[in-house]
Amino acid sequence: LQIVVTILNVNDNSPVFQELNLSRVVPEDTKVNAVIVARESLSASDADLDTIFYELTTTVVGTDGYFAIRGLNNPEIYLQKALDYEKFKLTTLLLYARDRPQGSTEVTHTATATIEIAIEQADTKPPWFLPCTFINTDKSVCISSPYAGRVNMGEMSREPLSLEPGPIYAIDPDYMIKEKVVYSIVGGNTENVFSVDANSGNLTMNKAATAPGSYLLQVMATQVNNIQKYAVVSVEIKVINKSDYPPHFETRIYNGTVAVGLAPGSFVYQAGDPAKPLMITAMDEDFPDV
């Protein structure tokens, strides 16, 4: 008597990942379509020799769409959308491996691998002069205002010039990197009257300005590690005649009189002399002829 026994392969094994927990550090400036986790690190095995079907999801709100797998049967994870360190710094991906297609009515076994992704800030932004104003909600662009100051004609200040809205100062907005910034004057410095300290940004004078008017300086802030990362700001320095005396009123108290019911814009007259409009005048000994 010959008995033939046929052993049927039953789907009784779950897919198995080589590693259940992985982590990767991804630079912010990683190119779209770059491989984040190789297929070899993510492929699951199945003792039943079934075809494995993969699905990738994220658990962190707002990080959908940045990472994806190459295909239903290819678990390689790649960057699908450009990263922005300001938008998120960490996310957690879940990779599912199933031995049946999703939605199948057959018995399905599933394995799950967790991939922790940390975004590393990259040197992507040029310097910002401060103070500056953000022009978008994600605070990725900050526009600075011009600086302004003044000097007396014929005088050379020995101290750094006082400017509005503050001293010349720029930062690297990639704050986790904080590359050093250096300063230089790249335009408007007629006759080399001014100089800027490369390290501090302090604006000083090399010699006195000899004529009234304005200097419209162009000051550049450059990252030491990359000259192509730079910003330029305008600095207007007005040259004025020296003022030795403060202005003052001719008298400390002025008295006037008005009639009830006058229309807006009507004259106010001197008290005691209703024929003469009240005039308030000031004097300045620096301008005796005015």
Image (cartoon, rainbow, N blue to C red):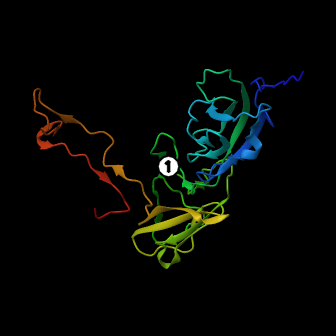
**Residue placed furthest toward the bottom:** 191
Residue 55 to residue 38: above or below: above
Screen quadrant of the C terminus: bottom left
Residue 182 to residue 247: above or below: below
Q: Percent x, y for residue 51?
A: 69, 36
147 on left or right of 280: right
In front: 212, or 242?
212
What amino acid type is highlighted by mark number 1?
Cys
Residue 118 image-quadrant placement: top right
Residue 73 to residue 232: above or below: above
In front: 15, or 131?
15
Count how many numbered circles sit on residues in the image.
1
Q: Residue at 50% x, 49% y: name it.
A: 141
Q: Residue at 47% x, 51% y: name it.
A: 143
SS type, badge 1? strand
Q: Percent x, y for residue 214?
A: 41, 68
Screen quadrant of the N terminus: top right
Q: Residue at 67% x, 64% y: name it.
A: 225
Disc 1: which residue: 142
In front: 201, or 240?
201
Q: Percent x, y for residue 41?
A: 76, 43
Residue 7 image-quadrant placement: top right
